[in-house]
Amino acid sequence: MSKNQTYSGLHLPDGMRVLSAAEMRRVHDAASAAARRHGVRGYIAAEIVFDALATAGVFNEPLSPDPDTCTAQYLPHDPAEFDADTLGVWQQCDEEPGHDDDHDSGEIGWPEGAPGSLPPKAAS
Ligand SMILES: [Zn+2]
C-alpha cells in the first residue's frame, strides 16, 4: 500500500512516500492549531513539522513545474545525503527543455530515472 505511484515515474525507497493534498492540508491545519495553542508563528510550526516528516521519509507533493525550463523534478529524499535545508525540497531542472544530459537544478544534479525523480512532462 504505497502512495508513491501517485506520480507516474516517481520511485522512492520502501517506506518513503509523498503525502496527498488532503493529507498535507490536515498536517498543515494540525501544525497551525498547535502553533496557536503555544503562541508559535504558524509558518515556523509548519516548517518544523514538514522538516520532521521529511526526516521520517514523508514528503510534500511537488509543485507544478515551471514550463520555461526542463520540467524534470527531483525530491532530495535521503537524510544521509541531504541536510535539513534541502531534504524534502523539490528541485526542478533549470536546463533547456529537451536537453539530453543529466538534469540539474543548479543545486542538485540527477540522472533521468533516479530514485526520487520525475521525468520531464511531455510537451503539450
Ligand atoms: Zn532536465
Image (cartoon, rainbow, N blue to C red):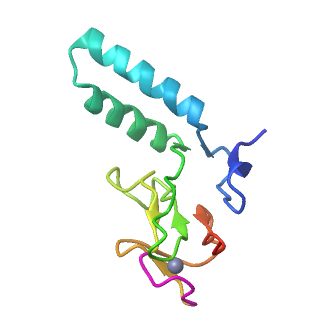
Residue 19 is situated, as x and y percent measured from the top left of the image, at 58, 39
Lateral position of residue 36 relative to residue 96, left or right: left
Lateral position of residue 112 relative to residue 49, left or right: right
Residue 25 is situated, as x and y percent measured from the top left of the image, at 50, 29
**Towards the viewer: 9 or 87:** 9
Residue depicted at 46% across the width and 73% down the height: 93
Residue 42: quarter of image? top left
Residue depicted at 68% across the width and 54% down the height: 7
Residue depicted at 20% across the width and 14% down the height: 39
Q: Quadrant of the N terminus?
A: top right
Determine if the magenta segment contains residue 118.
no
Residue 74 is situated, as x and y percent measured from the top left of the image, at 52, 64
Q: Main secondary structure of the magenta part?
A: loop
| Above or below for 19 versus 103 | above
- Outermost right residue: 1
- Outermost front residue: 124
Q: Quadrant of the C terminus?
A: bottom right
- Outermost top residue: 37
Residue depicted at 44% across the width and 63% down the height: 91
Number of numbered discs on residues = 0
| Above or below for 66 versus 43 | below
Instruction: Give the magenta part as a residue range.
Output: 94-100
| Above or below for 2 versus 105 | above
Residue 78 is situated, as x and y percent measured from the top left of the image, at 50, 56
| Above or below for 13 versus 46 | below
Residue 106: quarter of image? bottom left
- Outermost bottom residue: 100
